[in-house]
Amino acid sequence: MRIIAGQWRGRPLVAPKGDATRPTGDRTRETLFSMLLSRVGSFEGLAVGDFFAGSGALGFEALSRGAASCLFVEQDRAAIDTIRANGDKLGVRPDVHQTSVLSLGPAAQPLDLIFMDPPYGTGAGAVALDKLSRLGWTGPASWISIETDRREDVAVKGFAIDTVRDVGKARLTLLRAEA
């Protein structure tokens, strides 16, 4: 696993050992960031959340491409250690919260971009997005990416699906708040 583009392009990342996490592969990340780039234009200055962060690969990719900040949320201890180790390798101190995404309190302000890669087959991404939107983590300009198994569909009241793309075993769904 490596950073695809930006200031850390080509730098390797490690994944947590064991089966507790399933890191987003390089090809899937490359597809996701291409989809996002055509919509946001640039990652410069964006406030990002990497929820169900695992290795932190999505958040680190966004930071590499110019995001101003990234909040990493993960509850697995081994994954937290991996995010910190990846931050050390890249020379940054990641803002990591060891908690369930569903335990987050109200946001100070909406994030520009939220990545969610919950365990496949759980529906946790849709449940989390519903709660996060009620707590102010999303706004009218926020982009949300939820990765699921390719057989899963995502539907969240108040959010419109912008696009869906299948990559290998994964399905990438980009959403925006409905007007």
Image: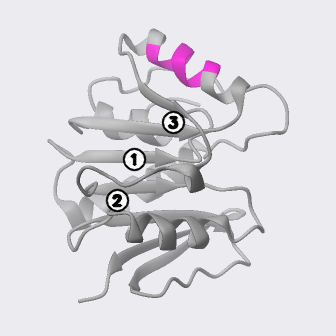
Residue 43 located left or right of residue 92:
left
Residue type highlighted by circle 2? Trp
Secondary structure found at label 2: loop
The residue singled out by tag 3 in the image is 57
- Which residue is at a point 61% across and 46% down the rendered structure image? 24
Mark 2–mark 1 CB contact (< 8 Å): yes
Instruction: Measure the alpha-carbon separation of dots 2 and 3.
Output: 21 Å
Question: Who's the residue at 58% across and 80% down the image?
Answer: 154
Relative depth, front residue between 157 and 43: 157
Apparent side of residue 29 relative to residue 71 in the rendered image (left or right): right
First along the sequence among labels 2 and 1 = 1
Amino acid under disc 1: Gly
The disc placed on residue 137 is 2
- Secondary structure under tag 3 reads helix
Please determine whether, in this image, residue 6 is positioned above or below residue 163.
above
The one nearer the camera, 166 or 46, is 46
Task: Provide the major secondary structure of the magenta segment.
Answer: helix
Residue 95 placement: quadrant: top left
Q: Is residue 64 left or right of residue 97?
A: left
The disc at residue 102 is none
Locate residue 166, reporting x and y percent. Answer: 60, 71
Check disc 1 and report its element: helix, strand or loop: strand
Which stretch did the figure color magenta?
81-87
- Residue named by callout 1: 49
- Whether 59 is drawn above or below 102: the answer is above
- Sequence order check: which comes first, mark 2 or mark 3? 3
For discs 3 and 1, the disc positioned in front in the rendered view = 1
Q: CA distance from mark 2 to mark 1?
A: 9 Å
The tag earlier along the polypeptide, 3 or 1, is: 1
> Is residue 77 shown above or below 85?
below
Image quadrant occupied by the N terminus: top right
- Give the quadrant of residue 3: top left
